[in-house]
Amino acid sequence: MWIKNFSRLVYGPVKHDGAAFVCNSCLNVFSSQRVLDSHILLCLQHPAQQTVYPQGDEAKLKFKDHDKEFSSHFYLVCDFESFLVPSDQESDTYSKTRIIDKHQMSGFCCHRVTDLPMYQTPPKVYSGPDVRSHFYEHIMSENREINQILSQQLPLSPMTTEQTRQHEAATKCANCNCPFTSRNHKVKHHSHLTGEYLFVLCNDCNLQLKSKKCKVKDADQDANSYALAIVFHNLQRYGSHFVIKHFKKQYSEKVTKVQTVSFDDVKVIPLNGERFL
């Protein structure tokens, strides 16, 4: 195929308003002939480049995160309640917006959701003063208690005759449906919280289905800190304002085994000044 003008070919995808100067060796686009000339002296020292796409089975995307197909043992469902109170804040003289009321938290509800009946608790409902402090204290208390529960490592309970027969007869993983191999061998998957046998897995899937731990930066920090998912009602458009604006440093404090204090990072993705992820 003959390309008469490289500049016209690549004009659409680039933001540069004007002629585009293309390197015929690496196909990079430059804004001026001077920059292109200085680039060519270095570029020609390397062999020409070509994009090679995968072929055959390598060109197929396969789902590998099979642990996402199973529900978490524990997660929290939370919701805030608030009411409007008159604002005494003076509006900006140059602003066209006048602040009349502000949202003030009046209470919260937090419910622990788990598939284990022995660890189910009634929802925590609070309404009164200093709602934010009570909310954070309750969340941290739930986190510590759930960490202790997940830290249990109960061995496999005795299997029934039918469970043993099914396990020995299995030739494929019940999760990823892949045949067992010498490298990825057959494993008896069981609940570490109850000891109950669940189903047969390959070794790779068995490791994926373990409870997820938080990433530990310091070797002295507690390595048994598990990730706890918290689901909010209307968090992105409303509840996140209460969570982020009134967050205190003490809630990310960690005490290491040698009694040194460190603080975890809090990462927020702002879409704009009013919405967060």
Image: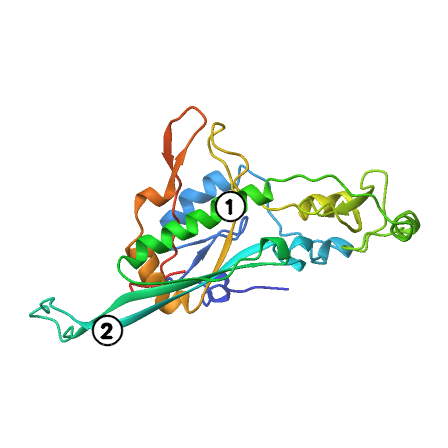
Q: Nearer the viewer, residue 84 or 29?
A: 84
The residue that label 1 is drawn on is 145
Q: What kind of residue is marked 2?
A: Leu
Name the residue rendered at 44%, 47% in the picture: 141
Spot occupied by residue 266 in the image (x, y as percentages of width and height): 38, 47
Counting other residues with Cα less than 10 Å from the Cα at mark 2, is it few (<14), some (14-19), or many (20 or more)? few
Residue 102 vs residue 13: left or right? left
Q: Is residue 199 left or right of residue 270?
A: right
Secondary structure type for disc 1: helix
Q: Is residue 24 above or below residue 213?
A: below
Q: Is residue 268 above or below residue 92?
A: above
In the image, residue 53 lies at what x, y percent? Answer: 67, 54
Residue 215 visible to the viewer: yes
Judged by depth in the image, the label closer to the viewer, 1 or 2, is: 1
Q: Quadrant of residue 85?
A: bottom left
Q: Residue furthest left?
A: 93
Q: Is residue 226 visible?
A: no
The residue carrying mark 2 is 84
36 vs 183: above or below: below
Measure how far apart labels 1 and 2 are at the Cα level.
35 Å
Which circle marks residue 75 in the picture? none
The image quadrant of residue 134 is bottom left
Seen at 36% across and 48% down, the residue is 34
Q: Quadrant of the N terminus?
A: bottom right
Do the numbered discs 1 and 2 sit on residues whose CB atoms are within 8 Å?
no
Q: Position of residue 164 (x, y in %)?
A: 89, 48
Horizontal side of residue 105 vs 209, given as left or right: left
